[in-house]
Image (cartoon, rainbow, N blue to C red):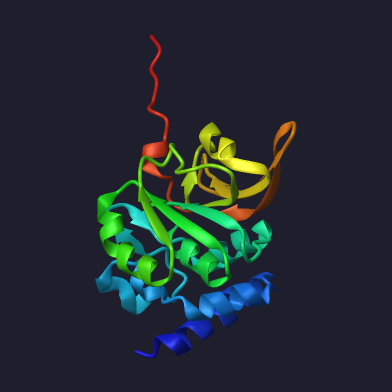
Amino acid sequence: MDFTAERKAMVDSQVRVNDVTDRAIHLAMMAVPREKFCAPERAFAAYSEEALPIAGDRRLMPARDVAKLLQALDARPGEKALALAGPYAAAVLARMGLTVTAQESDEAVVAVVADVLSQEGVATAVAPLDQPTGNGWDLILCEGGVERVPESWGAALRPGGRMAVVERRGAIGKAALFVKTPEGLSRRELFDSSPAVLAELTPAPTFAL
């Protein structure tokens, strides 16, 4: 299978046509081997629009949504980025010239993506997703859905830092861009997106008598 041709087709048919105009994103996505970020038996479908499994209940975010989040972040070479449950996005950011750490909490996911992340120059951290590694990040990005953005994520940003996350409380989620200001986090909705909600960040149900 010609994955190089598949990458170009993905960018042409899923990314460019969805108003992602940043050429740095196009070039990075045509270089990163997306097939190495999903379960090996699904590598043949890596460049489809499907949300492919990585391990367990974790899935890759469709390339269209990753690209739109990255464009909203306005990532710049030399910046420092943290990808929470976002291994593919981490590699794309590294190809764009950023210093990137990919944080995962599930060892099964790490087993799939650790080697390719290392090859892409991305550092890997294993810790609960509500406990971001380090602080003073220029960018934070997540490929999974969250019902509510943990306060700890905003706290890990530097002043002026940006964060792109999909908030999902129903059938359709909303991708949003957050910017850390002296008054707190500003929020701007971006587009509809429906990634699977990250189970460990889902509040436990409460019952009242």
Between 109 and 202, the residue placed more toward the observer is 109
Query: Which quadrant of the structure image shows residue 201?
Result: top left
Q: Residue at x 53, y 75 (%)?
A: 29
Q: Residue at x 53, y 42 (%)?
A: 135
Judge left or right: residue 39 versus residue 61.
Answer: left
From the top left corner, tell me how far across and down residue 191 is, in percent. 65, 55
Q: Position of residue 82 (x, y in %)?
A: 51, 52
Q: Is residue 189 left or right of residue 153?
A: right
Vertical arrangement, residue 43 with respect to residue 208, above or below = below
Residue nearest the observer in this picture, 180 or 192: 180
Residue 12, by quadrant, is bottom right
Residue situated in front as seen by the camera: 63 or 104: 104
Residue 6 place in picture, x, y as percent: 45, 85
Give the vertical position of 137 relative to 77 (above or below). Answer: above
Which of the image's four quarters has the C terminus? Answer: top left
Position of 27 with respect to 33 (left or right) is: right
Q: Quadrant of the N terminus?
A: bottom left
159 to the left or right of 44: right
The percent position of residue 118, horizontal first and vertical second, equals 36, 67
Is residue 150 in view? no
Question: Image point 41% across, 50% down: which residue?
Answer: 103
Question: Does residue 73 show up?
Answer: yes
